[in-house]
Amino acid sequence: MEPAENRNGALYTVVLIAAMLSVAHAAIFVRMADADPMVIAAYRMLIAAAVVLPVALYGARGEISRLTARDWKLLGFGSLLLALHFATWIEGVARTSIANSVVLVTLTPVWLALWSAIALRRPPGRATWLAVVLAVAGSAVMAWGSVRVGLGTLIGDALALAGGMFFAAFFLVAEDARRRLGTLAFVALVYAGAALLLWIPVAGQGLTVTGFSGETWFALVAIGLVSQVVGHSGFNWAVRALSPMFLALVLLSEPVLSAGLGWLYFREGFGIETVIGGSLILGAIWLGMRAELPRRAEPAG
């Protein structure tokens, strides 16, 4: 019979591939949707919560009923971080170039590495640091030639940078919470909390939330079901067995996959910078896989 370790490894591989492809489609759906970016983010979380929360209330109601005060605080914190990630990053994209925002958001592995080294006193190995450097270099190469200077751009860059920090913090919260909570209960409650937090500014600003075209409604539903329910839920499931650093490095393939999907769906070309930068990012993911998986397999002290 096939060893359990091999079966589990194959399962995680399939889930991560499906999750990555689903998340990478988010850029395609955002392009299709003719709506305010904040509205897109709010609908993304609302639709995801509408699908997952009823299932959790039925299938994980016992687990939810046993949540402690600490668990609820952790879930609330995770909801806030996820909402802030989407709010700052999407607003940042509106103020700066997409390439600039990609470079800054992909600094997530850097924040995780610094947190591990300073706060946890468990500095990553040299291979992991090399993977981080390659990833940042690859993102910078992909963004080469698109840098714009100006106050509005600097604000957008700062928002995108904050978005990456919030996402790194969310990974750490998810890792902590998933030690006690199942995937279904965690994602359902966090998605619902993030949706509530995102709809508050949408309502406060009086943004348009109805009267969209059929294509926009399709994109909104797709980004909620595909990119969030399948994509982000897959990553939240994997964080129980894989390190946040490893998952952050895997997420670096999103701009590479998005470029490929842009060519597939819209026949958008890409230059030599995308080829070189994408190769560096893929190399970083490979190094991170080799460096982080053995560290995760080590028994706890």
Image (cartoon, rainbow, N blue to C red):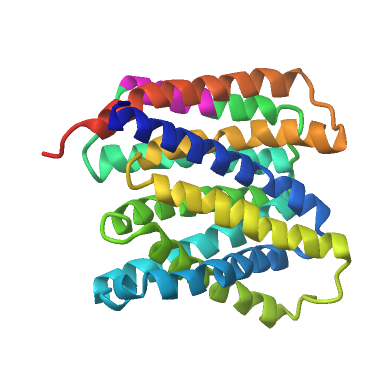
Q: Please provide percent x and percent y for residue 164.
A: 52, 48
**To which quarter of the image does residue 10 belong?**
top left
Q: Nearer the viewer, residue 260 or 255?
A: 260
Q: Nearer the viewer, residue 43 or 204?
A: 43
Q: Is residue 65 magenta?
A: no
**To which quarter of the image does residue 182 belong?**
bottom left
Residue 172 falls left or right of residue 162: left
Q: Nearer the viewer, residue 134 or 296?
A: 296
Look at 74% across and 54% down and name the residue there.
Answer: 94
> Which quarter of the image is occupied by the N terminus?
top left
Residue 208 falls left or right of residue 231: right
Q: Is residue 132 magenta?
A: yes
Look at 61% across and 62% down and name the residue there.
Answer: 87
Look at 67% across and 82% down and name the residue there.
Answer: 204
Q: Is residue 123 visible?
A: no
**To which quarter of the image does residue 186 belong?**
bottom left
The magenta stretch is 126-135
111 shown above or below 75? above
Residue 129 falls left or right of residue 69: right
Q: Please provide percent x and percent y for residue 89.
A: 62, 54
> Which quarter of the image is occupied by the C terminus?
top left
74 shown above or below 133? below
Q: Please provide percent x and percent y for residue 244.
A: 38, 42
Q: Nearer the viewer, residue 199 or 84?
A: 199
